[in-house]
Image: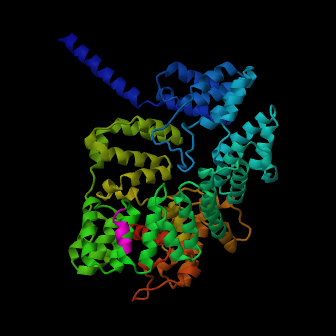
Amino acid sequence: MKRIIFLIFLAVNSLITLATEDSNINDYKLFASGKALLSQENYKDALTKFELLSEKYPESRLFTSKYANYYIGMTYYNLGDYNKARGFLERAIYTPKDFKTGDTYFKKSKKHLFEYERNYYLAKIYLEQGLKEEALKHFKFLIKNYYSKELETYEKMALKELGKYDPYYEILYMVKYEDALPILLSLKNEDILALGDFFQSKGSYESAEKAYSEYINLEKKDIHQVKLSLLETLRRAKKYKVLWEKSSDFIGSSSSDNSDFYYYLATAEMQLGKKLNAEESFSKVTTGKYKEAASLNLSRLKSSRGDYEGAISILKHIKNSSAHDLLMETYIKAEMTEEFKETSVDYIKKYPYSDQAAYYRFLLYKESQNPNYLNWIIKYNINTYYYEMAYSIMENMRDLEEYPLNYKSSIYRDNIKRLESIAELGDGEILKIEFDNLYFADKDRVFKEYLMSSIYEKGGFYLDSVLNSRKYQDDFSKYSNLITLLYPRYYVPLVKEAAQKYGIEEALIYSVILQESVFEPTLISKAGATGMMQIMLSTARDMNPNITQEELFVPAVNIDLGARYLKKLLTKFNGDVPKAVASYNAGAGNVSKWPSDEKGDLDIEKIPFSETKKYVKRVINNYYKYKRIYHY
C-alpha cells in the first residue's frame, strides 16, 4: 500500500513538474537578453546568452521555428567567426504564419522575415571566405524591380559592394538613388525596364515615365506589357492628357488586340470630361484583364446620364461587390423598387453581418417603414453606422451577453501565465512565435481569439491587438466584455488631458485615432500624414510653426495637436460632429459646399467623395460605441 501511495506521489509530482516547465519561459528570457545585448553591440555577452540557450533548450520554439538563427548568426558575424555565422545565417529562414509580402501589383519576392539582411550579410561572409561568385550572387538578390523602405538600406549597400567589381552598378546606384536620370541610357535595356517598375512602385512617376518611354524607344518593337506599364504610370500620376495621347498612339501603331489600350484611352477621356467618347472606348474593351473594370465604368457612365436599362444589363453580368453596389444604386435611381427589394434581400441572406447588408436594411426600412428591418440591423450589424441610425429611431439597443472569461481563464491558467510572461519581455516577434504554436479546443475558439488580443494589449502591442480583434469582430460583438477590444482606450491620460484642454469629448478623440491609425504612433501615410491622429506637417505648422515631423511621432504631441485641430473644426461648424469629422478627412472647404438634409445636418449619404463617406460613417460608429461602452 505504501508503495502504491509512493508511486502516485511520484506521478503527481512529475505532472506538476511538467506543467511548471511548460509555463517556464527561461528560453525566451535568455534569448531576449541576448538579443538586447546584441542591439547594444555587446557581442561577447550576447554570445554567452545564446550559447547557454542552445545548450539548455535545443528544442525551444526559437530554434524549431528558425527565428533565433538570424540573431545568433549576426552575433558570430560581429565577433568575426564567419564559419559559425554562415552556418546560422544559411538556416535563418523564418516565416511567421501571418507573414505578408505586400504589394501584389509588383509581386514582391520577400518570402521570409530576414530575407534582405540575411542575403546581405551572407554575401559579406562569402567575400571574407574567398567565395566571390557566391557573394556577388547574394548581393544581386537584393537588386529588385520594386521599392521598399525596408529593402532600401540593403540594396544601397549591395550596389556599393557590386560597384567595386563592376562600375556598371555604380551607374545603377546613381540612377536609382541619386536621381541621375540623364545617364539612364548607359544601362542595359532590361535594367531600364526594371527601373520603370522600381520608380512606379516608389511613386516617382516622372522617373518611371522616362524609364518606360526610353525602353520602348530602344526596343523598337511592340512591347505590349511595357506600354501598359507606361500607361498605368500616367494614370497614377493623373496626367490624363498625356495618357490620352499615348493610348491613341499605341492603338494606331499596334497590330495586336487593342482592348487594354482602349481601357486607358477611355479612362483618360472620362477624366477629361469626354464622357460619350469614354463610353465608346470602354465598349471596345472586349478581352483582357481590364474587361471587367471597363464594363463597370461603362455602366457607371450610362447610369450617370440616365440610361439605367443599359447600365443594368451590363451590371447583371459582372460578379463582384463593386458591380453589385452600383447595380443597387441604379435600381434606386431608376425607382425600380421591386428589383431593388429582391436583389437586396438575396444579398442580405448571403452576408447578414456585412456593412452593405446594414445599408440595404436601412433603405428597405425607409421605403416600407417596417421596423423589423431596424431590429435586424440591431441584431446583426452592431459595428456599423446604420446600427446607430436604427438605435436613434427605435431607442432600442442590442443586449450583449457576458462571455465566461473567468471560467475559461481557469481552464487555461497555465497558457495565460506563460503568454503574459512572454508579453512582459516586450518583444512582439517572440510573442508571435508562441501564438503560432497555440492550440485550443474548437469549442474554445472564441477564448483563444480573445486571449491573443488581450495578451497583445497587455504587452503594449496595441495595433496587433485591434487588428487581431477585427478578424473576429462578429464573435467579439456578441459579448459585453469582448467588444471593448474592438473599441479600446489606450493612452488614457493623454486623451483625457487633451479633451479637457480643448473642451471636446474623449469619445471623439478616441474615434478619430481608432480610424486614422489604430493607435500606431509611428504610422506615416504615403501623403505624409503622421502619427496617431495622422496629422499633415503643414496642418501641424499652422498651429505650431516650429514643429518637426519627428515630433509628430510623439503620442503626447500628436494627440494634443489632433485634438486642437478637431476643436477648430467643431467651432467652425457650430459643434456639428459629422461635419467636423468630414472636414478632418476632406478639408473644411469641401464640406462647406456639400448638401445638407432636411434638418440642416450633413447628408452623409450624399458626400461626393466615397472615401470620405466611408470615413465619416466609421468614425461616427466609433464615436457612439465609445460613448455607450464607456458611459461618456
Q: Is residue 173 visible?
A: yes
| Quarter of the image where the C terminus is located | bottom left
As for residue 315 lying within the magenta part, the answer is yes
Q: Which residues are magenta?
A: 310-317
Q: Is residue 629 visible?
A: no
Q: Residue furthest left?
A: 1
Q: Is residue 210 left or right of residue 374?
A: right
The chosen color scheme is rainbow
Residue 67 at x, y percent in the picture: 53, 31
Residue situated in front as seen by the camera: 561 or 143? 143
Q: Is residue 9 left or right of residue 315?
A: left
* Above-or-below relation of 521 to 62: below
Q: Is residue 555 left or right of residue 421?
A: right
Q: Main secondary structure of the magenta part?
A: helix
As for residue 610 lying within the magenta part, the answer is no
Residue 384 at x, y percent in the picture: 36, 67
